[in-house]
Image (spheres, rainbow, N blue to C red):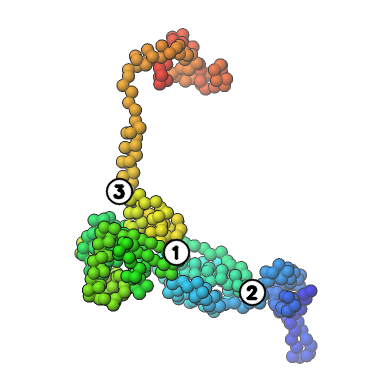
């Protein structure tokens, strides 16, 4: 059983012990005593807090003192440990997010991080000119830290607050047509030519192509025309096999010939004078400027590769394995529809309708003759061309009464017959 008590201090004048501050509680967790403040000054409210704490101990969900002492820096250590255990390669991006979170939440207790504090952080970042997507990535980092803390034993985070998110309107939708790709590749230096060709035909990620972790010749099998990536060499931890043909294969063979002749000790497919490189923005922008194609990025080649695979009739599941997309939602973002695709869809629809269209080369007289041979048609004696709102009788054929339409009463209408298409003559 637990108990409630208040701290005491000695009065300097009377030397008597006086109670002060909120009520504290003492309860047992697997035989170990736990002392914790209820943060309540009313004993009735403090008693309710004690009962909840004892109930959580019985359910195995105790919120220990660690929840009240955990600070922002403790959650950073948990996030860093998770990245190390799972071998993730994007810690540099998390450090970028943490540099923006620390000035606001550094040294703060986790229990003090509320939705109001998060909204203040959003307002501050927007005043600094940050984009909505950048702010959302910072919040994602903090949310992940709190989730990791809540899953530990004992938990470091008791309750995760609501994380507001901003609407993102900066999703890129650029891609390159084939003539634009050939123009830029023709104006690019040799080390960029190879990287562009790989990105255009496979949709591979930039970091899978260049840098020290990029594509190496031991992953390329020219004799069978394939590129093989192991699970440790991909972002999604999924092995991939990509086959090469025609222009793609010719470029790779030429790059291998130059590498063996000039840089025999270089293991990288994309290199600059035998050394790996991790930045190609300057060379890319220079090549685009030479041919007058502005506003394009190297990542547009990835979107283009995905779109070309779909245009070529490759099943989407196969295209996802080639490009390395693991989820359908992200793949759909890369499978961009251009105006040419919409124009081609309209042409296909028109061709389909033309094939299905049937033209009858008959006259109304022939139709009327055929209808007489088949049998007597039913006279239309319950409808009229003009409608009246003063109907007082129903229709014997349907069984329903329509008070908005008066039936025909003119005797000439009884001789009207219908052709096969339902038109009256």
Q: Which residue is mark 2?
A: 154
Which quadrant of the figure has residue 290?
bottom left
Secondary element under disc 1, as helix, strand or loop, is loop
Q: Is residue 57 left or right of residue 290?
A: right
Element type at mark 2: loop
Q: Nearer the viewer, residue 307 or 127?
A: 307
Task: Give the mark nearer the N terminus: 2 vs 3.
Answer: 2
**Foreground residue among 296 and 276:** 276
Is label 2 in contact with label 3 (beta carbons under 8 Å)?
no
Residue depicted at x 51% and y 74%? 85
Q: Nearer the viewer, mark 1 or mark 3?
A: 1
Q: Are marks 1 and 2 in contact (CB under 8 Å)?
A: no
Q: Which residue is mark 3?
A: 340
Q: Residue at x 63, y 73 (%)?
A: 153
Is residue 294 shown to the viewer in this render? no
Residue 238 - label:
1
The residues tagged by marks 1 and 3 sit, at their Cα atoms, a distance apart of: 33 Å
């Amino acid at each position: 059983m637990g108990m409630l008590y208040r701290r005491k201090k000695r009065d300097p004048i009377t030397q008597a012990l006086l109670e002060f501050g909120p009520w504290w509680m003492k309860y047992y967790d697997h035989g170990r005593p736990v002392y914790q403040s209820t943060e309540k000054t009313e004993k009735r409210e403090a008693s309710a807090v004690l009962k909840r704490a004892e109930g959580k101990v019985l359910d195995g969900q105790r919120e220990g003192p660690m929840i009240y002492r955990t600070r922002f820096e403790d959650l950073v250590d948990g996030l860093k440990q998770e990245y190390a255990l799972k071998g993730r390669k994007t810690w540099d991006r998390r450090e970028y997010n943490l540099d923006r979170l620390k000035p606001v939440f550094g040294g703060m207790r986790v229990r003090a991080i509320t939705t109001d504090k998060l909204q203040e952080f959003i307002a501050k970042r927007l005043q600094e000119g940050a984009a909505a997507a950048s702010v959302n990535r910072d919040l994602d980092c903090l949310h992940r830290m709190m989730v990791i803390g809540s899953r530990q034993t004992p938990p470091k985070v008791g309750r995760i607050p609501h994380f507001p998110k901003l609407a993102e309107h900066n999703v890129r939708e650029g891609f390159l047509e084939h003539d634009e790709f050939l123009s830029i590749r023709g104006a690019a230096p040799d080390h960029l030519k190879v990287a562009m060709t790989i990105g255009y035909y496979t949709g591979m990620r930039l970091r899978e192509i260049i840098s020290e972790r990029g594509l190496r010749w031991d992953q390329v099998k020219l004799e069978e025309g394939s590129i093989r990536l192991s699970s440790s060499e991909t972002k999604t931890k999924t092995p991939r096999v990509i086959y090469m043909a025609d222009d793609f294969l010719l470029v790779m063979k030429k790059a291998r010939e130059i590498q063996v002749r000039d840089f025999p000790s270089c293991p990288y497919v994309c290199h600059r004078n035998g050394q790996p490189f991790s930045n190609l923005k300057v060379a890319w922008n220079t090549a685009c400027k030479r041919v007058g194609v502005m506003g394009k990025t190297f990542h547009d080649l990835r979107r283009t590769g995905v779109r070309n695979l779909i245009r070529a009739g490759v099943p989407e599941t196969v295209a996802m394995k080639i490009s390395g997309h693991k989820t359908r939602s992200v793949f759909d973002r890369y499978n961009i529809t251009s105006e040419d695709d919409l124009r081609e869809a309209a042409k296909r629809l028109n061709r389909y309708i033309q094939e299905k269209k049937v033209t009858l080369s008959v006259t109304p007289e022939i139709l009327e003759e055929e209808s007489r041979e088949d049998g007597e048609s039913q006279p239309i004696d319950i409808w009229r061309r003009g409608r009246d709102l003063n109907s007082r009788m129903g229709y014997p054929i349907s069984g329903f009464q329509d008070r908005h339409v008066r039936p025909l009463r003119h005797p000439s209408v009884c001789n009207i017959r219908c052709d096969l298409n339902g038109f009256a003559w």
